[in-house]
Image: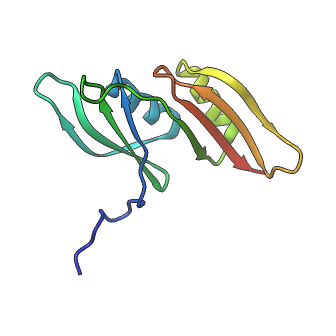
């Protein structure tokens, strides 16, 4: 039986269309130790499509075009150390929305930040 998706991929992958796909790739590599899986560039140097693996998930990214304008998302990522990851995001130029904290009756310690493209990232660790 043929595989209907690449080995190690989830069935659903968020797709970020941004002004500055390479900048997003670099950001995700610095914050989450992302790994490039596949990449397709345009002749003008922009990125048509790139896949970044973060832990067990794949995030797809492309440069905005008139046909596909930039979009914004809220993404949640579980990380081993929320404080360390949040600090890396701040060092990479992201903006704090909410410092990492634990809420009553919530087993997660969670913080939220905004990247250069206006995406919001909630990062958390189980406590």
Q: Measuring from the top left, give residue 30's x and y in whole percent.
A: 47, 32
Residue nearest the observer in this picture, 72 or 35 = 72
| In-image side of 98 versus 30 (left or right) | right
Residue nearest the observer in this picture, 24 or 65 = 65
Q: Measuring from the top left, give residue 26's x and y in whole percent.
A: 39, 29
- Residue at the farthest right position: 104
User: Residue at (51%, 22%) from the top-left corner?
Assistant: 118
Residue nearest the observer in this picture, 95 or 85 = 95
User: Residue at (89%, 45%) from the top-left corner?
Assistant: 104
Is residue 93 shown above or below 85?
above
Is residue 5 shown above or below 116?
below
Residue 94 occupies quadrant: top right
User: Residue at (87%, 51%) from the top-left corner?
Assistant: 105
Is residue 49 shown above or below 95?
below
- Residue at the farthest front position: 67
Residue 70 occupies quadrant: top left
């Amino acid at each position: 039986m043929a595989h209907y998706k690449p080995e190690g991929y989830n069935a659903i992958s968020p797709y970020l269309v941004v002004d500055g796909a390479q900048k997003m790739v670099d950001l995700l590599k610095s914050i989450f130790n992302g790994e490039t899986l596949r990449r397709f560039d345009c002749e003008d140097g922009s990125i048509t499509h790139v896949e970044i693996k973060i832990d067990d998930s794949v995030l797809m990214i492309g440069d905005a075009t008139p046909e596909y304008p930039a979009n914004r998302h809220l993404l949640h990522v579980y990380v081993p150390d929320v404080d360390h990851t949040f600090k890396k995001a701040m060092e990479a130029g992201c903006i704090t929305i909410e410092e990492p904290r634990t809420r009553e009756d919530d087993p997660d310690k969670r913080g939220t930040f905004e990247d250069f493209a206006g995406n919001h990232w909630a990062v958390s660790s189980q406590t």
